[in-house]
Amino acid sequence: MKCLLVVNRMNDVRFLDFDDDFAEYINNQAIEIGLLQAEECGLDAYYVDPNIIMQIFSPLVLSQWFLIEQTKNPCSSVTCENGFLFVFKHMDDLLLIAINGDGTETEEFLLKKIQMFLRLIGFLFGPATDEIGRYEDKRERWNFLRRLLETWMKLCCDEQAFLVEAVERLHVNQTLNEKCIELLEEGVKKIQSVPAHHALLLVNNKLLALYSNWNANELQPADILCILLLAKDVFPSKEKLEDLFSRSYCMASHETGRTSQFVPSTARISSYLGDDSDADDDLYLSAQTTPRTTPTPDNSSRSSEKDSGSLGNDDDELTPEGAVLLDIPSPSPYPEVSPHVACEREVFFTPHDDVKLDSLYKTYSTPRESNSLPPEMFHEIRPQSSTVASYDASVVNTRPHRPEHVPEYWRQMIFLQTRVCGYSPHQLHCTQVLPGIVLILVTEGSKGNVAGHLCQVFIIIKDLLAGKRDKLNRVQGQNLYDVMNSLLSKIQGLLKKVKGQSQRILNDIKKRWEGEELRTGLLAYLESEIGTDMAPTIETALSDLFRKLKELFSLLYLSPKAVNESVKEIMLQLQKKLKAELADYRDFLTVKAQRNIPMTSYIYEFPGLVHFIYIDRQSHQLTAPSLNVTTDGELDPKQYLKEMVWSKYQYAMVRLSEGYVTTIIQDGDFYFSYFLWFEDNRGSPLAVAEPFRPTTDLPLPGLLTGPFYKLLIKQCFPNYVPGSVRCFELFMMHLGLVQPQYIASHCQQLAKKLWDMSLIEI
């Protein structure tokens, strides 16, 4: 029972996403309190009127807005007697509310979901947050955002890179790497119509190759992860390692005139599975996933914390946290698939359990029994309504619509984080080379030089409206006014040739800014004592100016534009060339994406080590053995180990947010350890200058939800020179027979080994 609700100050719903259980619950509540008649929702039980949601939750929403505006100290979360959990986050004129009513998501995860949603909004729409609820194409935008959230949830459960929020590079030989870089460089240099900055080659959520122009701003790791997320959503690949063993070859025998099939232990079906690969690609099709109910956890194990260290913490001893419950899925039979021989083309189906790792989000609470069907099944049993056309289709909770076929060419405006601009407009050009292999080119957006000035004005106005300012004298106040005036003048100069709606908005902005009342009132506010409220007339004038500037930003960068045919043609030419060059490496890359780093190369040197995750937080690059789960009708032990790793890493992140940078936990037959430390550029360890003291405004540990590690370094080393302090993380899983002192020794030895390997790769 989940929902994500976004409203503005007028209590208009700007975004809404919910599951079927939540829709049914809201409709039942509406019937009980008289907001809805039973016959009104009987035709389509999974439609929810946003007005009804706002009426039911209006006390919470209105009280939250009151606390935001009057006390400046709103609630972060609310837990109701019936078990409903509400988590709030305020940004600009939007209030985001994440709701969970079945206990399957913790407060930390709901806050992470909200922050991830904000990251997606900034990546796709920049500071123009109102664009998510624009009426003209609200249905398409809501569907796209729902798809991205769903894809992010799946990647968080499946991929270590999204669990720890770091980029995972695909380790290949030098010959293949150089070939890929040369092809990417060729594609970037061919584009002449617009500045091309970056080219990426992705293989199943991993970065194979990256080429950037010499004059381009560095592509930030957080932006690379967002690009990976978009690529996974638009070009989904269900290729798994077992696909190589379930591949079907139909080899026509000219002598006998018969077809010989080699069928491993898979079930055969006759339906055509969409794939944009050519007909001569060995008739290769990826195995699909069988949706079925998530097994109910019935086993749990006690977990006790053995040791935990903190930077600068006054406590010498950490109190044990008590029991940590782990969910162990019980095996259940797969749906039967009747074998059938296709007439023209045969497709083989490998059953696979779509495990969602629900236990990740309820590690610290007793699991609740649930007999509800998984979301995948509701589209099959949902009653059809003859009156759906009269509803707002954007709020009917069907599962996010996905195109049946992979697009040949796809483009998307995105906003990257650079040194000079927090929302630098760029165009993303994507095409699929082979299933699972995606080519991406990043070009600069038109009028990109204006975005930096607009973003600077946004920051100043937002700080003024939020009361974030120091008391200034007359000269300092005049200087701030002159800075804003200079930025707005530069915007006017750069856009002096625009016409139409853009010109009208520019004239309106100039008229509002040059008003004597705004200038006099703003200077008086800047000279007043700290804590003095801004005059309502000045606040209204600044808010209107801010809204007009965001409207100008939307018009410049988010308005529909024609496809650049020359860029598209170059992309398709490069796609064909890459397809020919990488055809011989296709199976190799599929295996490497699933078995990037084998654990066997470490188990002899580090006895008792089961798994590890090593992260360089300067470059945010991940090094970890692959964790691949294959299910053959029985419970896969690797699935249990994977759930253990996921839950314990999440637990370590909770402890890190509390200030503990070293944690060792014993759970059953395993030890789990987490270490965070700092080094200089020569690899020598650094002692912190100031203790790490978590604050309420510190973002959650990770990369996508905020610069946690940058702020951590800044707090521990107040006088550091940027780039002089490197932060590292190491998470390890050992057998329970290994003593804690050997775990600490393994941490040092493994960190040194991985450091030396990184120097060799460079």
Image (spheres, helix red, strand yellow):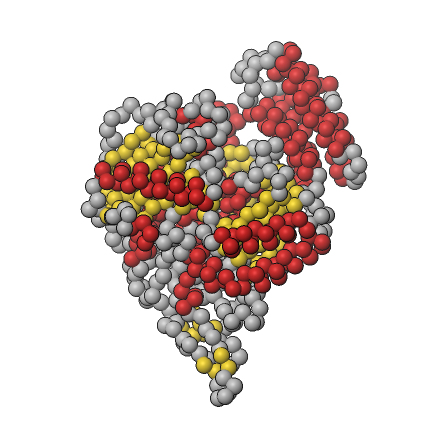
Tell me where residue 549 appears, x and y as whole percent.
67, 33
In the image: residue 75, left or right of residue 534: left
Tell me where residue 143 appears, x and y as whole percent.
56, 52
**Residue at point 43% right, 66% down?**
244
Tell me where residue 71 appears, x and y as whole percent.
48, 24
**Residue at point 62% right, 19% down?**
535
Residue 124 occupies quadrant = top right
The residue nearer to you, when weighing 155 against 548, is 155
Which residue extends farthest bottom? Answer: 256
**Residue at point 24% right, 43% down?**
666
The residue nearer to you, when weighing 616 against 709, is 616
Residue 496: tell me if it is visible. Answer: yes
**Residue at point 40% right, 65% down?**
242
Placement of 164 over or under 710, stated as above or below: below
The residue nearer to you, when weighing 194 against 1, is 194
The residue nearer to you, when weighing 696 against 28, is 696
Residue 109: tell me if it is visible. Answer: no
Placement of 206 over or under 291, stated as above or below: above
Residue 125 occupies quadrant = top right
Tell me where residue 40 appears, x and y as whole percent.
52, 55
In the image: residue 684, left or right of residue 64: left
Number of marks present in the image shown:
0
Placement of 76 over or under 573, stated as above or below: above
